[in-house]
Amino acid sequence: MREIAFIKQNKEKWLDFEQAIFGKSKKNPDEMASLYIHLINDLSYAQTYYPKSKTVVYLNYLASQIYQKIYKTKRVEKNRLVEFFLTEVPLIVYEYKRYLVYAFTLFFVCVAIGVVSAMCDVDFVRLILGDGYVNMTLENIQNGNPVAVYKSGSNWGSFIGITMNNLFVGARCYTYGLFFGIGTFYALLQNSIMLGAFQYFFYQQGVFWESVRGIWIHGAMEIFGIVIESTAGFILGASILFPKTYSRVNSLKIGFKNSFKIFISTVPFTIAAGFLEGFITRYSIDMPHWLSVLIILSTLALISFYYLVFPFIVHKKLNKNVSTI
């Protein structure tokens, strides 16, 4: 897009924002926050395509003005990494919160499909998990430890191997979004149906609680993380399918930038899940029930709070700061 067309397309929005900054018009906090997000996206675009133009100087000035006013009470510069996880990612998650709803809805529906399918077809679990894995698990159940598979290998070896595999699965759920979101849909559907069938299999064998105590020690973060990574994939796909006022290429760039940040935010949780699976899950059958339940609830609460609650807290705080301008 030529610079003059870019200016013409966004001029009214920038003037509106300028008037709001300098008190010439009244905006509620939600409108100001939305304008701020659009301004940052426009600045990023201008820096890429018109790096030496007056447009970049103008947008930079507006951004600096609003930043100073929003954060005027902060005297200590934040660590960039802390800012990324505690402010940037939560605000992006809040902006795309409807995609979280889509991903979790698909996840729960597909888990239910896996359960019903395993319930109605005795061969479904073998079809999904493979004869070798099912036979090995049946043998473990007969030996009194349904989750003995997690005891194979050394602690560090398991941790590294599992973490690398989980990172690959998460990256696949995300990058498949480039196929208009269809690839992400398939990857999440596949994993969710497998989970539903897997858990029903343990229920069918009468060791459901033992499996929960083992699998969900690491699974709370691992499975939740896959849903978040799929959310990022859906955002990526939507940026191609629904460019709105941007060209399809520019929409993809913005969608990639925002969705990639969400994806990156899942990496610490994926590593933590790998650590738990490599070092803790293998002892689940021997640990007290209260301890395994505590670990499961704590990890689930942590990741749930970060992605489902904290974005609303950060957004509300931003709105409060903006309303004081």
Image (cartoon, rainbow, N blue to C red):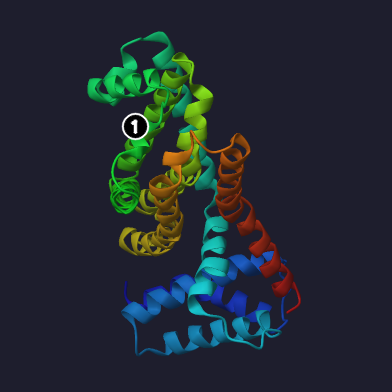
Q: Percent from the top left, x then y, of residue 29?
A: 70, 67
Q: Is residue 317 above or below residue 78?
A: above
**Going by the image, does 287 lie left or right of 121?**
right
Residue 243 visible to the viewer: yes
SS class, disc 1: helix
Q: Is residue 166 above or below residue 107?
A: below
Disc 1 residue type (three-letter):
Gln
Residue 7 visible to the viewer: no
Of residue 295 and residue 285, the one placed in the foreground of this image is 285
Q: Residue at x 71, y 74 (%)?
A: 321
Q: Residues within 10 Å of mark 1 (few under 14, many from 20)?
A: some
Q: Which quarter of the picture shows residue 182?
A: top left
Q: Which quarter of the picture shows residue 187?
A: top left
Q: Residue at x 35, y 24 (%)?
A: 140
> How many tags in the picture?
1
Quadrant that contains the N terminus: bottom left
Q: Is residue 127 above or below residue 262?
A: above
**Going by the image, does 284 lie left or right of 177?**
right
Quadrant that contains the C terminus: bottom right
Q: Is residue 256 above or below residue 110?
A: below
**Going by the image, does 79 lie left or right of 123?**
right
Q: Percent from the top left, x then y, of residue 86?
A: 57, 67
**Going by the image, does 9 lie left or right of 61?**
left
Q: Percent from the top left, x then y, of residue 276?
A: 45, 48
| Residue that carries the numbered disc 1 in the rendered image | 190
Of residue 307 and residue 204, the one placed in the foreground of this image is 204
